[in-house]
């Protein structure tokens, strides 16, 4: 790690590219949200698991999503040479919370309860090009059930996701968990007699349904289509008859779960795997009803296709349904904040055995952004009451005031900078978002009183009234020293 | 990152050497402790700061304590080559929370309030040889005030440390914050007319006071000493007269702060810096009294020498004073769990300006071990009520029971493994530390009742009574289905 000490005597004080710092309310708002979600997970019987940030590259494996190059996308380094010869292991920072779960599930398979319900919350790292709002360290928040093949596990996770979103502060009606099943799609492909080498192409066209509609997808699946720019897009080459089950699948969402399930059953035709998939969705719908989760909160919806490739059974996605204003002031749907589903390959890499698992992942930054957009986070994160220092020699008196306030549960501190310039003390209180400043000069001390300045009212008055009015009703009152705590408590209760 | 895929087709499921996983209560107990401490910090006006795990090696600097080799002891890697030529930056995992604070204090110096009170909690990484109980990732918990030269900042931190220990669960009387001042020691060396090249030697001998006592140190400072094994140890070469202030310093702890301060004032003689140090300690003692922190909680104690080299003013250490049994069953003092002090060099590397700072660091793992030793952590971390599955087709009924219990705030889950073998379900409940199992077979369902099995009482009876007695008072009761939640609540209240 050479540093040219002569050319560059002073290091740059900079966050590394793609990383950022979180201050004050940014930390506490996220913590509060995650605490509330953790409480829901705990109530559902899930246990916390905290693995370390570092894994061997060998254990992490090469399944970072959307990356073709092996081991690209992670931060990795080689351990120092082993004493006695040989090169050290390659180590890396985890890129998600699923890979460490896979390692843990394999490593402790004889000790963990089975099924093993666990949740994990923490940072993960991606060695990718940073972009606006795209960082190389970010939080994930996962819950998984390992070792249960029952769709009851999937239904439970969907219900828990709905409960978690509500606990975080998203109101019922402002979100929807939409559930599909990879097996149904497989059944549809089977019913359509799609060849194995056509399947990827068909999936790609299905993904365009939102953009080009039913007729568009029909053209793309069969003979091709001319797009808006006049370009010819080649079709997959299915017959109209083959395209029919796929289009039936895409348009199968009915007025309620019963209608959707009937449409899906028609779409999969005689496919065994497809029928199994529809049965599973029907069971999940029943179990959600038993769990008290209505169709206004979680619903069968065949349009959830994204990421289906990774999964082997039920999949789901939670969407926030309210509109927000984007950076250009246009209304738009907030969109997806969580997703998940059933997958089998978790432990197999390590042990050779398939272990059924299902899980969910909440997009921490997206959900937090949604809460902020709705004004649902902790709010303005009240600063401390600031006890100003009028007389440097009476620091003990000021500290005693702060201690009294804290003993009453009120956040408080003494100004600890150079007290010479009183204006600086008030500027400091402003920067701290202090609701109140306490002032006691020598005169006040002699008379046994303190001045209590309401900084919130002060700011309000300053912005709303003329200077003269402001002077005539200053947001400052004098109280007896022994009444300090009560007076501050009353003033805080105003806001 | 080459992996020989042919020789080693299956990766090893192993935590990397020196790292470990934390399960269930291990996670929640630490979280609960840190939450309580954070609440105290917040109440004192400190703001959370969360920097990322990764820093540039340049910004981290080379001040990892106790390591002579530059950049050894950290996990570091070089970024990929920069497009267009040039090598990438060296990056590293942070080795403590102070180096990132230094970077932040320099980077945002125009935006942060001054003084800046911040706390930080999180993992740090050390690339060191792991040992028993010594891991390469561990938690730190720091609070620092940057930009205040006032000893009021030091006093506040000492008081806050005492409050934090009590909030974590350590009772008053079971801990003591001991405070010294680097300037007093400098004054003593000045009064003793110790040459600059002798100072390190003198400090080394002072550190042996606990082991060899006053006479031993006197010999080591002057002409030398024969140790227990008969080996001759060379002395530093001070005269008896020179040794006198050092010995006076070492034995200056009096019955109370006033006595100690008088002894220290005598020990520093006419040294200006020493006098300043004693004045500062006297002010800290006064301020602690104003803050309501008595000498039973924080006291002036010149025996705190450890780590003095790093600090420039007041230093302190929190010790737990109760005895625990070590691994061999011998009683011993628990010892130090936190420390800190005043330092100046924080931001200087970056900006060239000295910025006064003072801070504390709590040894998270040690404090947690202390709480465990005293039985003061969350306890046995109650498992969920487990609803067993007697009839696979009635999964909805079982899920509804679990949902009802959760709605009443009771942690509950349905068994999601293969329900065929009921014994496995009870074994599972045991592994989960479930307090209660719910059982409803077809017969019970028909009669509209459920069986509630008290697993805690069951275990108790099984260990205490004979098999016949056990059979005659099984820890299992039958209640009407609609009475399930109340019955579970009552049973949980027993314990």
Image: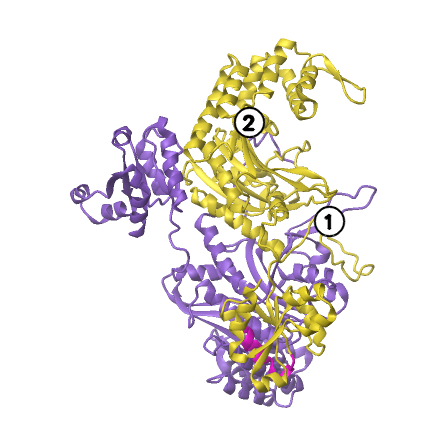
Chain colours: A yellow, B purple
**Quick one: A110 or A306, which is closer to the camera?**
A306
- SS assignment at label 2: loop
Q: Which mark is residue A301?
A: 2
In the image, residue A139 sits, relative to residue B363, either above or below, namely above
Q: Can residue A35 be seen?
A: yes
In the image, residue A223 sits, relative to residue B426, either above or below, namely above
**Quick one: B100 or B3, which is closer to the camera?**
B100
Which residue has dot 1 on it? A17
Q: Residues within 10 Å of mark 1 (few under 14, many from 20)?
A: some
Q: Which mark is residue A36?
A: none
The reply to whether the C-beta atoms of the residues labelled 1 and 2 are less than 8 Å apart is: no
Q: Can residue B300 be seen?
A: no
Please give left or right for residue B435 compared with residue B272 in the image.
Answer: left
Q: Residues within 10 Å of mark 2 (few under 14, many from 20)?
A: many
- Residue at 52% of width from left, 40% of height from top? A172
Work out whether disc 1 and disc 2 sit on a shared chain.
yes
Instruction: Report the chain holding disc 2.
Output: A
Query: Residue A426: x and y, percent?
Result: 68, 71
- Residue at 68% of width from left, 17% of height from top? A215
Q: Between disc 1 and disc 2, whose residue precedes?
A: 1
Mark toward the viewer: 1 or 2: 2
The span from disc 1 to disc 2 (Cα, nearest Å) is: 40 Å
- SS assignment at label 1: loop
Q: Is residue B453 magenta?
A: no
Region of the chain picked out in magenta, as a range: A390-403
Please give left or right for residue A57 compared with residue A330 in the image.
Answer: left
- Residue at 39% of width from left, 68% of height from top? B323
Please give left or right for residue A473 compared with residue A254 in the image.
Answer: right
Magenta highlight: main SS: helix
Quadrant, the N terminus of chain B: top right
């Amino acid at each position: 790690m050479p540093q040219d000490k002569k050319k560059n005597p002073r290091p740059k004080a900079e966050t590394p590219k793609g990383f950022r710092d979180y201050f004050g309310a940014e930390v506490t708002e996220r913590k509060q949200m995650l605490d509330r979600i953790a409480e829901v997970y705990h109530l559902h019987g899930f246990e916390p698991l905290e693995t370390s940030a570092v894994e061997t590259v060998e254990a992490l494996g090469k399944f970072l999503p959307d990356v073709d190059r092996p081991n690209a996308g992670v931060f990795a380094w080689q351990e120092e040479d082993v004493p006695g010869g040989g090169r050290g292991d390659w180590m890396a920072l985890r890129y998600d919370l699923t890979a460490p779960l896979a390692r843990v599930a394999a490593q402790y398979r004889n000790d963990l309860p089975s099924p093993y319900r666990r949740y994990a919350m923490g940072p993960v790292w991606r060695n990718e090009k940073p972009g606006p709002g795209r960082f190389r360290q970010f939080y994930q928040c996962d819950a998984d059930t390992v070792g249960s093949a029952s769709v009851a596990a999937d239904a439970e996770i969907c219900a828990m996701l709905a409960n978690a979103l509500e606990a975080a502060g998203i109101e019922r009606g402002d979100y929807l968990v939409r559930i599909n099943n990879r097996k149904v799609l497989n059944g549809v492909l089977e019913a359509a007699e799609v060849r194995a080498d056509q399947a990827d192409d068909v999936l790609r066209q299905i993904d365009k349904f939102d953009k080009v509609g039913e007729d568009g997808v029909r053209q793309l699946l069969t003979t091709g289509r001319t797009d808006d720019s006049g370009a010819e897009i080649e079709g997959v080459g299915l017959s109209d008859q083959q395209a029919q089950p796929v289009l039936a699948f895409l348009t199968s969402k009915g007025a309620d779960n019963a209608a959707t399930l009937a449409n899906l059953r028609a779409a999969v035709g005689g496919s065994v795997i497809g029928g199994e998939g529809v049965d599973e969705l029907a069971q999940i719908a029943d179990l959600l009803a038993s769990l008290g989760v209505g169709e206004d909160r979680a619903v069968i919806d065949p349009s959830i296709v994204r990421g289906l490739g990774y999964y082997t059974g039920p999949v789901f996605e939670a969407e926030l349904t309210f509109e927000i204003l984007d950076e250009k002031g246009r209304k738009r749907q907030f969109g997806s904040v969580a997703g998940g589903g059933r997958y089998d390959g978790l432990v197999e890499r390590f042990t050779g055995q398939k272990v059924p698992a299902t899980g969910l992942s909440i997009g921490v930054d997206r959900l937090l952004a949604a809460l902020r957009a709705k004004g649902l986070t902790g709010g303005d994160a009240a600063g401390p009451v600031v006890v100003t220092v009028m007389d440097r020699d009476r620091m003990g008196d000021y500290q005693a005031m702060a201690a009294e306030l804290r003993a009453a549960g009120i956040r408080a501190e003494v100004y600890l900078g150079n007290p010479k310039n009183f204006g600086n003390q008030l500027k400091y209180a402003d920067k701290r978002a202090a609701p109140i400043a306490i002032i006691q000069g020598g005169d006040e001390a002699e008379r046994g009183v303190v001045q209590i300045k309401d900084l919130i009212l002060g700011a309000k008055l300053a912005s709303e009234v003329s200077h003269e009015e402001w002077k005539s009703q200053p947001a400052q009152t004098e109280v007896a020293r022994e009444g300090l705590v009560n007076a501050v408590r009353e003033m805080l209760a105003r806001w």
